[in-house]
Amino acid sequence: MITLISSLLAVLCSGIGLVVLSKSDAKRHRKDSEHWPLPKSIRWLTVVAVLLPGFALGFTGLVSSLLVWLGAITVSGWLIALLPRRLT
C-alpha cells in the first residue's frame, strides 16, 4: 500500500512540473503568442522539482515505487507531448 501511495504522490508532483515545462516550451509554441516563457533559472528549478520525487524515492529505499514513478512519468511526458498545442 505504501508503494501505491508514494508512487501516486511522486507522479502527481512530477506531473505538475511537466505540465509547467510544456506550457513554457518555446519550441513547442513558436507560432503561438499565448505561451508564457519562463526565465532559464525558473525552468531549471522546475526540472529539479520534477526530478526531486524520484531522488526522494531512491534515497528512502522505495525501489518499487521508484520504478513505478520512472515508468509513469515517462508515459505522462509522452502523453503531454502528444496533446495538441492549444491544450498545453
Image (cartoon, rainbow, N blue to C red):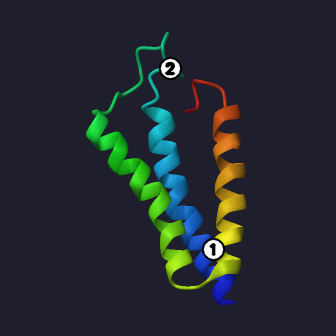
Category of crowding for the residue at label 2, using alpha-carbon neighbours closer than 10 angstroms: few (below 14), some (14–19), many (at least 20): few
- Could you tell me if the residues under marks 1 and 2 are in contact, i.e. CB atoms within 8 Å? no
Above or below: residue 74 compared with residue 7: above
Above or below: residue 42 compared with residue 82: below
Q: Earlier in the sequence, mark 1 or mark 2?
A: 1
Q: Residue 25's mark?
A: none
Residue 15, image quadrant: bottom right
Which residue has dot 2 on it? 27
Above or below: residue 74 compared with residue 13: above
Which residue has dot 1 on it? 7
Where is residue 40 drawn, in percent x and y? 30, 34
Residue found 47% across the figure and 34% down from its top: 23
Q: Amino acid at mark 2?
A: Lys
Residue found 66% across the figure and 61% down from its top: 70
Where is residue 63 drawn, in percent x and y? 66, 79
Residue at the limit of the structure toward the bottom, as seen here: 1
Q: Where is the C terminus found, in terms of image quarters?
A: top right
Q: CA gap, disc 1 to disc 2? A: 31 Å
Category of crowding for the residue at label 1, using alpha-carbon neighbours closer than 10 angstroms: few (below 14), some (14–19), many (at least 20): many
Please name whichever residue, 55 or 28, is drawn nearer the observer in this view of the structure: 55
Q: Amino acid at mark 1?
A: Ser
Where is residue 11 drawn, in percent x and y? 59, 64
Where is residue 58 drawn, in percent x and y? 56, 76
Residue found 55% across the figure and 72% down from its top: 9
- SS label for mark 1: helix
Determine whether, in the image, residue 37 is placed left or right of residue 60.
Answer: left
- SS label for mark 2: loop
Residue at the limit of the structure toward the top, as seen here: 31
Residue found 35% across the figure and 27% down from its top: 37
